[in-house]
Image (cartoon, rainbow, N blue to C red):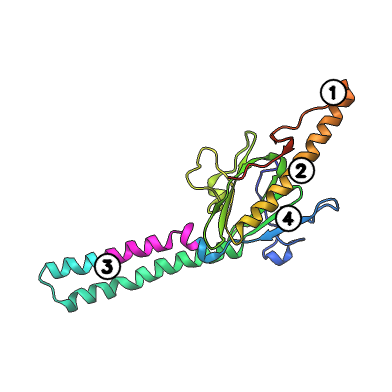
Amino acid sequence: MSTLKAVPNTGHEHEFEPQLGLPERLPQDERVLWQGAPDWKRMARERFHLPALTGYFTAILILRAGFILSGEGSIGDALTAVVMLLPLVVFALGSLALLAWLSARTTVYTITDKRVVMRVGIVLSLTFNLPLRRIESAGLKLHKDGHGNIPLTLGGSERIAVLHLWPHARPWRVTKPEPMLCCVPDAAHVAQILQTAWTAAAGEEAAAAASSVRGANGEAAQPARSLNGTPQLAID
């Protein structure tokens, strides 16, 4: 079974998880380095585009009022038209804010010394296990307040569908979707934890490969993706 396949949560509530944010308890030789979740307000702004939609609906209401006034309608008529549409606007924006809150509330990102785990989904929880050895690179988009997004580029031919990932996917990556830890507080610190874990995992993998090759022909293998002799995860 592919390590990237989404696994539905077997419980109806997250408190029935064997371990927070994880589909099963970690092996004894694996430890959690960091766990966190998106900030829902930031998610409402960035992933659900609430400010832009608020501006759009405001412009619609203003145009509606202006159309009535230009047609020789009274100010009262214009206000009545705006008030009639206002509940629909509030309902639409409120629904988006609720979706952002639910999305953040039901999400747990976990970084261990062997993988990144993303538990996402409002109605149906999905868990994505992303082994560190399968991550080729990571990005970091940092905001002034410390929040940021960390997209992950996966190696190999396997893909995760954008519809399964959204809104935890890097924008405009459709043919090769990139999972993303989005709207994470103190994102620079989280990126550093990820880089350190990846470096350690890559070093262990290179050491195991070198030992295997040395045993076969007496020559040590060189670690891939190295910088100054030390494996590094490129976070830009």
How crowded pointer 4 is (Cα within 10 Å; few <14, some 14-19, many 20+) is rated as many
Indicate whether 165 appears above or below 231: below
The image quadrant of residue 217 is top right
Q: Give the range drawn in magenta.
A: 44-60
Q: Distance between the residues labelled 1 and 4?
A: 41 Å
Label whose residue precedes the other's in the sequence (4 or 2): 4
Label whose residue precedes the other's in the sequence (1 or 2): 2
Query: Callout 2, which amino acid?
Result: Ala
Mark 1 against mark 2, which lies toward the viewer?
1
Residue at the spot x=37%, y=65% of the render? 54
**Along the horizontal axis of the image, is 207 left or right of 47?**
right
Label whose residue precedes the other's in the sequence (3 or 2): 3
Read off the residue under disc 1.
219
Q: Examine the structure image and report whether residue 57 is included in the region drawn in magenta.
A: yes
Label count reads 4
The image quadrant of residue 220 is top right
Read off the residue under disc 2.
201
Viewer can see residue 126: no
Read off the residue under disc 4.
23
Q: Where is residue 124 in the image (x, y as percent from the top left)?
A: 61, 57
Q: Is mark 4 on a helix, strand or loop?
A: loop
How crowded pointer 2 is (Cα within 10 Å; few <14, some 14-19, many 20+) is rated as some
Q: Considering the image in quadrants, where does the N terminus appear?
A: top right
Mark 1 against mark 3, which lies toward the viewer?
1
Query: Callout 1, which amino acid?
Result: Glu
Indicate whether 34 appears above or below 175: below
The image quadrant of residue 232 is top right
Read off the residue under disc 3.
61
Q: Position of residue 201 (x, y in %)?
A: 76, 43
